[in-house]
Image (cartoon, rainbow, N blue to C red):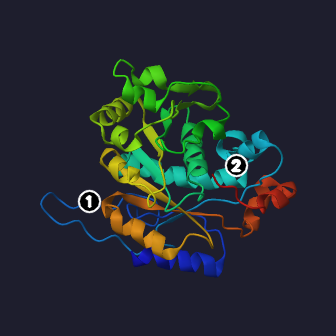
Amino acid sequence: MSKFFEALERAEREHALPTRVASPRTTADGSPPPTAPSGEAEPAAPPLPVGPVAWAPATAVAGDRASRGQERLVSLFDSTSFEAEQYRVLRQVVETLRKGANLQVVAVTSPAVGEGKTTTAINLSGALAQSTDARVLVADTDLRRPSLARELGLGGSRRGLVDALLEASLTLEDTVERLAHFNLSVLLAGRTAVAPYELLKSQRLEALLEEARQRYDFIVLDTPPFIPVPDCRLLAKCVDGFLIVVTAHRTPRGMLAEVLDLMDPAKVVGLVFNGDDARRPTYYDVYAGPSRGARLRRAWGTS
């Protein structure tokens, strides 16, 4: 656990954006850790240079709701930007773990509300979907406060996860919406859930996610925050790993420690360090051009 806090301390002290992502389940160069022969203990992972932290960039938040949403969702609407490049770094970690550690269902959570987990889930999904060969599903499993539809601008009454959980006749295909322009499939929450705990505890959820495993290469779940409600602990049985979104200068260390104590260590993929307002490396100016500088230094918008 100390590695997590050391990484956070170092990030806040140096206030600089690193160029790579590390996780407890990868080595420093992004490759999966070596596996031991059958019957032998696995070797300890080598020290990580920056700790198990992924880095979420600073993006602009301005204008009307649609503009704000597009500003945040850089993987979908500004895929050549510096911010989108950082989500591709996170994508590379997930793709590597998909091959080496069978990471297929990734849950994005946070210790509390407002840390940016929904934005992170969408941008990670969008980054993964940039591969034309990838079949990617992003699903809203935050049944108490669903926000995927709002962030993606998908209004109206659409069937979703709650409908599929309540109606056994509905299949995953009946409730998933395909965003062909983005090569991305979306499973919204659907109707209002009266008893979220019971729905997430049901075997029906396990069956739907198993169906998703057969249809998609990557399933990214936007989950509820971990501390306030028990929902993530119910979802844990269905996921391969958790990404924990924490916010710079905001997330209480004790709350993060509580999450890590409650979560199965084997399922902690890493942290996404959100809201770092350090200026991007000047190296990227060669590719992005100087006109992007001011926008890239604005405040991060969370959901």
Q: Nearer the viewer, mark 1 or mark 2?
A: 2
Q: Residue at x 66, y 50 (%)?
A: 84
Amino acid bearing label 2:
Arg
| 292, above or below 145, in the image | below
Task: Check disc 1 and give the amino acid type.
Answer: Thr
Task: Determine crowd level at label 1: few under 14, some 14-19, many 20+ residues with C-alpha closer than 10 A.
Answer: few
Q: Give residue 115's mark.
A: none
Image location of residue 200, percent across then percent down: 36, 41
Q: Residue at x 38, y 54 (%)?
A: 230
Q: Is residue 75 visible?
A: yes
Give whichever of 182, 187 is nearer the camera.
187
Q: Which residue is at the front of the view, 95 or 12?
A: 12
Helix, strand, or loop for circle 2?
A: helix
Q: Which residue is mark 2?
A: 72
x%, y% of residue 46?
37, 73
Give above or below for 152 relative to 288: above
Residue 57: quarter of image: bottom right
Q: Position of residue 74 (x, y in %)?
A: 69, 46
Tell me residue 247's x, y (percent). 59, 66
The furthest residue to the right: 291
Q: Give the distance between the C-alpha atoms of the residues marked 1 and 2, in whole angstroms.
A: 38 Å
Decide which of tag 1 and tag 2 comes sooner along the chain. 1
Q: What residue would you read off at disc 1?
A: 35
164 vs 239: above or below:
above
Total marks placed? 2
Secondary structure under badge 1?
A: loop
In which quadrant will I find the N terminus? bottom left
Instruction: Left or right? Give the position of 243 relative to 60.
Output: left
